[in-house]
Image (cartoon, grey):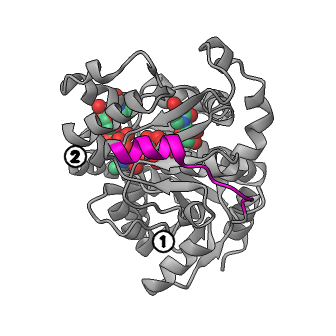
Amino acid sequence: MKILTVVGARPQFIKAAPVSRILRQHHTEFLLHTGQHYDDAMSDLFFRQLAIPAPDLNLEVGSGRHGAQTGAMLPGIELVAIEQRPDWILIYGDTNSTLAGALVGAKLHIRVAHVEAGLRSYDRRMPEEVNRVVADHLSDILLSPTDAAVANLAREGITEGVRMVGDVMYDVALASAQAARKRDIVRRLGLKTKGYVLATVHRPGNVDEKGPLESVLKAFAECGETVVFPAHPRTRKRIREFGLESRLKETVRMIDPVDYLDFLALLIDAKKVATDSGGVQKEAYFFGIPCVTLRDETEWIETVEDGWNAVVGTDTPDVVDAIKNFNPRGTKSKSFGDGHAAEKIAGLLESFP
Ligand code: UD1
Ligand code: UDP
């Protein structure tokens, strides 16, 4: 088979790593990076650390408004698809790069495989929700990470081509845990095991307006814990624009984004996680770290049903209360697969009629 993989943003590099590795054992992959993320710490760093082959092409579209950014990706992906004539276009998650890959495949009658299909927040104001709904409806094979995702697809009348494979992020997390435990970032930052909260924030709804961003930063300052905060470039830019630097008390350690193993190392040793990231909510669950989600809903409902994720929004008192008092008990019972989602995906692409 020939597979055209389209990636562009940080979490997609992490998700693609195990799948690319397995696909390349028996097949040809053309790896197309749209250039949606471009800072070393948001892109190339992950290729190096996770031993992902260098992209065959980087479209270097960069940042922009949704229409401009997505539109800029289309001609480049289309040209490669026409030249390469792949058997599959493989897309991940819910970014503008995902949407662009899906559109090109559908228009050129090239089969589209969507990894992480069926996730829903049921909030169409989120750009990701629009991207995943369209991508799912255009995909030929829908590779879902959870049973809840399969049920979401069924509610929209999508049953054909749906396969529950487990979560590729679980594959990567399991495979990387040992290496992460050897990292010394916790010591280097002068932190104590279970003596800090790890925080990330980047959703447009939380950072593109001053109100919610200020409210979250205030909660970090007032929660009574050291907060380690590897800031997404979008968030750092907004903090500067809104003049919110003064909200970062000395207990709030805003640092640059870190590499994947350092991030896992910080997560494993954290007392709690506070985040609006989809991937980080799951990773907290994988490693049994209580998660405070800075949103009003989540796609990863298993983590909430099992009692490990408190979805609290962005109001300062609610976030402070959850950071101080949310203490899950009991075991983790929900399935994100068996750590072999990537093999299942490769097998399904090979055997799909
Ligand atoms: C994108 C995805 C989001 C995903 C996130 C992962 C969409 C619509 N959103 O959001 O689903 O959770 O990636 O991190 O596709 N920037 C830099 N350097 C970079 C990348 C971004 O400075 O390397 C800054 C730019 O100011 C840019 C802003 O971050 O305008 C936002 O980047 P963009 O890719 O548009 O969206 P994300 O918020 O990263
Ligand atoms: N991550 C990382 N370094 C950081 C912050 C996050 O490596 O400084 C990883 C994290 O481990 C997770 C992924 O990035 O696997 C999540 O990506 P992000 O939060 O950007 O996007 P989302 O999952 O919300 O789409």
Q: Which residue is mark 1?
A: 139
Residue 325 magenta-highlighted: yes
Residue at x-position 52% and y-position 53%: 84
Q: Which residue is mark 2?
A: 68
Q: Is residue 208 left or right of residue 185?
A: left
Give the residue type at disc 2: Ala
Measured as percent of width and height from the top left, residue 198 is found at 54, 33
- The crowding category of the residue bearing disc 1, from other C-alpha atoms within 10 Å (few below 14, some 14 to 19, many at least 20), is many
Residue at x-position 73% and y-position 65%: 333
- The crowding category of the residue bearing disc 2, from other C-alpha atoms within 10 Å (few below 14, some 14 to 19, many at least 20), is few
**Quarter of the figure that contains the C terminus:** bottom right
Give the residue type at disc 1: Ser
Give SS at disc 1.
loop
Residue 262 found in image quarter: top right
Residue reaching furthest to the right? 178
In primary-sequence order, the first of circles 1 and 2 is 2
Marks 1 & 2, CB-CB < 8 Å contact: no
> Is the residue 208 above or below the residue 49 in the image?
below
Q: Is residue 60 left or right of residue 51?
A: left
Decide which of 327, 220 is in the foreground and name it: 327
Which residues are drawn in magenta?
A: 317-332
Residue 70 magenta-highlighted: no
